[in-house]
Amino acid sequence: MIDHDNDTRVPARMTPVLGAAVMAAGGAVLAYLSPPARRRRAAKDKHRALVAYLHDHLSGSDVALRVVRKLASTHEGTPDGVLCRLLMEEFERDRVALRSLLHHLHASTLSPKRAAGRASGVLASHVAGGAPGDVALLRALEALAIAIQGKRCLWRGLQSLATTPAAGPLDFVELEARAVRQWQTVDDRRRELAIATFPDLATP
């Protein structure tokens, strides 16, 4: 005689469901028991990604610095030369900040991207220049304005990263504020040059 009150057999239709539940629970247990290696691997991947990201910006900094050096030399003794000389000094400080951040992250400042960036900087500096009213100068300042906005995005993004303590004494808020001031100065001059370069489109 079968005691139905004590029958603990699982209905056949429930077996696949329970099997999936057991597998899921087992996977969760394995994930819980072996996360240290996975977490270390994920942390290393993120660290490498951050370093690559900073190398991108350091390479861009190399290019921008070459351009303003060329412009400062080409326009020495003029208001544009003074502006580019100021930008050159500030770009140098920004590059030092990037190198310092990489140092705090125990990463090298050297990379293939920087080598390529130097080559691009040489090319960009050759085509930069021109007197006010020449499109070459307008293009150079426009490229600098875009580069500065990218740098601002960098500093703004780093303000919210968990890696911020690794930055040491760097103040990302002030670095962003400086980028905003740089952009405003360059953009004001760029707009003036747009009128001088394209007078036919200027409002009478």
Image (tube, rainbow, N blue to C red):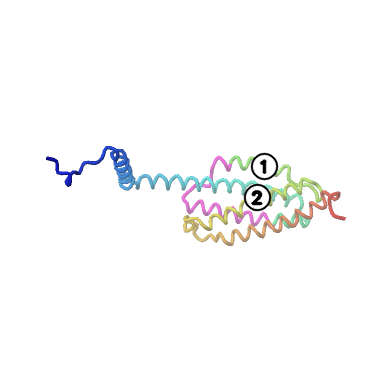
Give the image location of residue 114, x and y in percent: 58, 43
Give the image location of residue 126, x and y in percent: 72, 42
Q: Is residue 31 left or right of residue 89?
A: left
Name the kind of residue labelled 1 in the image. Answer: Val
Q: Is residue 46 left or right of residue 180?
A: left
Name the kind of residue labelled 2 in the image. Answer: Ala
Residue 77: quadrant of the picture: bottom right
Please say whether residue 111 is one of the residues in the magenta stretch.
yes
Going by the picture, which residue comes out furthest to the left? Answer: 1
Of 119 and 28, the residue lying toward us: 28
> Quadrant of the image for the C terminus?
bottom right
Region of the chain picked out in magenta, as a range: 86-114
- The residue where tag 1 is placed is 122
Please say whether residue 110 is one of the residues in the magenta stretch.
yes
- The residue where tag 2 is placed is 147
Going by the picture, which residue comes out furthest to the front? Answer: 1
